[in-house]
Image: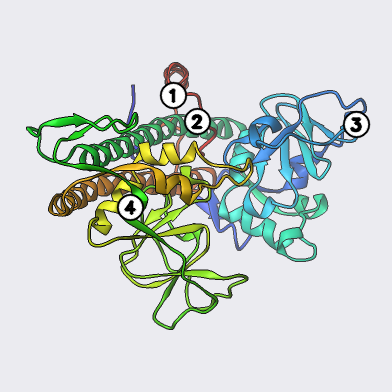
Amino acid sequence: MKQNLSPDLKPYPSYKPSGVEWLGDMPAHWEVRRIKTLFREKDERSGDGHGELLSLTRSHGLIPQTEASNRIASIEDLSNYKVCRPGTLVMNRMQAWSGMFAVPSQKGLISPDYSVFELVSESEVKYFERLFKTSLLVGQFAQRSRGIGSGFNRLYTADFGSIPAIVPPLSEQTAIVRYLDWADELIRRYIRSRERLIELLEEYRQAVIHHAVTRGLDPDVRFMPSGIEWLGDVPAHWEVRRLKFSVENVIDQTQKRKKHEIYLAMEHVESWTGKYGDAGADVAFDSQVKRFRAEDVLFGKLRPYLAKVTRPDRAGVCVGEFLVLRPRNCTMSPSYLERLMRSKPIIDTINASTFGAKMPRADWQFIGSMAQPLPPLSEQIAISAYLDKTTADIDAAIDRARREIELLGEYRTRLVADVVTGQVDVREAEVGLSDEVDALKSQNAMGEPDKGNYL
């Protein structure tokens, strides 16, 4: 089976001017046609409202509305909704400027504000779906969209139809779709492998942190029962103490930020890593905020399962959704406290105590009453130094995997654009790929479920 995602694709033997400045040159045997000669709008309404409601999403195409959102559709009357069928092309008129097109894989109902187009003559609709998502065409859709403000601009059918498109012969449209299907399957597999690697590395990071902050670094140490279910055994020379006896919950409120101070809201702190970014200089406070010192530990009490825990190296102010935790009497190292409060068993325990359905919050009274392991201060510092080194290596591996996914996405976008606009010739490369696509799809079906069309 071919596994080279970048075969030696070459340009077509000859090119000619398209006659359209923004289209540039195209293969000599391709043609330029206005979209209205390729598609006509089809306005078929449900009438009885029966059928599955579909939603057009950016990453997954047309999918059942129940899968697109956790919110249940409150629409009672679907009789005026449009019907779409396989083989048609659906466009979100308000988002055409961002490439919101899809070919339905099933019959269903869609919003009346979507447009449905059917082919005028025999063509490969999926070729045009991909063409219409390229920056070349998307730029034209943006220019032709009309309305009040960019968020409410619509691409009307007459304007859509007037735009020229490059059209290869039908056999090449089919070859292009087959080739991109094959590339898509390989990209899906690689992305899934990188995503799985990231999941495993994140799980490993959590396991390393939890083991270090609850069992220490000495494998030969003697253990004793902690008396706490989630904690288990701890080194015999450690203490187990309620957090409030080691840590102060600081409530120093203000409505002003000093010139040298940073400002942190929940959205400025990354989940599970403690990385944070300052909101910048121009911030207005609607209510009082909390002041913190450098090395204080900020614990996000809103939706604690997000693990928004950080230890800023500068003084600043933060929203009230953070607890500002400060060690008492040098009994606890700030770096150890940060790692401890971000360990998964503690996050899970705190999360189970929250109140409020839509905006669950943790309470200091519960958190402060939690018993925590407390090694000697010198050991806390050693544990923190060990975790700084170990987690830095893990984080670097995670960053590399994420960068690979990002680069692959950039490559994918360029590949599609080059193929559907005739910059490269895939006619020879796609020969025999049909069986490979089927085999890859079969392998994918035996593994994780497909998450959508990447190309």
Where, by quadrant of the figure, is residue 349 drawn? top left
Q: Mark 4 or mark 2: which comes first in sequence?
A: 2
Kindly identify the residue that appears in the image at 76 percent across and 59 percent down: 152
> Residue 112's quadrant in the figure?
top right
Element carrying mark 1:
helix
- Mark 1 and mark 3 in contact? Answer it, CB < 8 Å: no
**Tag 2 or tag 1, which sits nearer the N-term?**
2
At mark 3, the secondary structure is: loop
Q: CA distance from mark 4 to mark 3?
A: 64 Å
Q: Which residue is mark 4?
A: 245
Q: Position of residue 198 (x, y in %)?
A: 34, 38
**Labels 2 and 3 touching (C-beta < 8 A):** no
Residue 415 in view (yes/no): no
For the point 50% across and 24% down, the residue is 449
The amino acid type, in three-letter code, at marker 2 is Asp
Q: Which residue is mark 2?
A: 181
| Residue pointed to by mark 1 | 433
View extreme (left): residue: 220
- What is the crowding at mark 1: few (fewer than 14 residues within 10 Å), some, or many (at least 20)? some
Q: Amino acid at mark 1?
A: Leu
Confirm or deny contact between disc 4 and disc 3 (CB under 8 A): no
Closer to the eye: label 4 or 1: 4
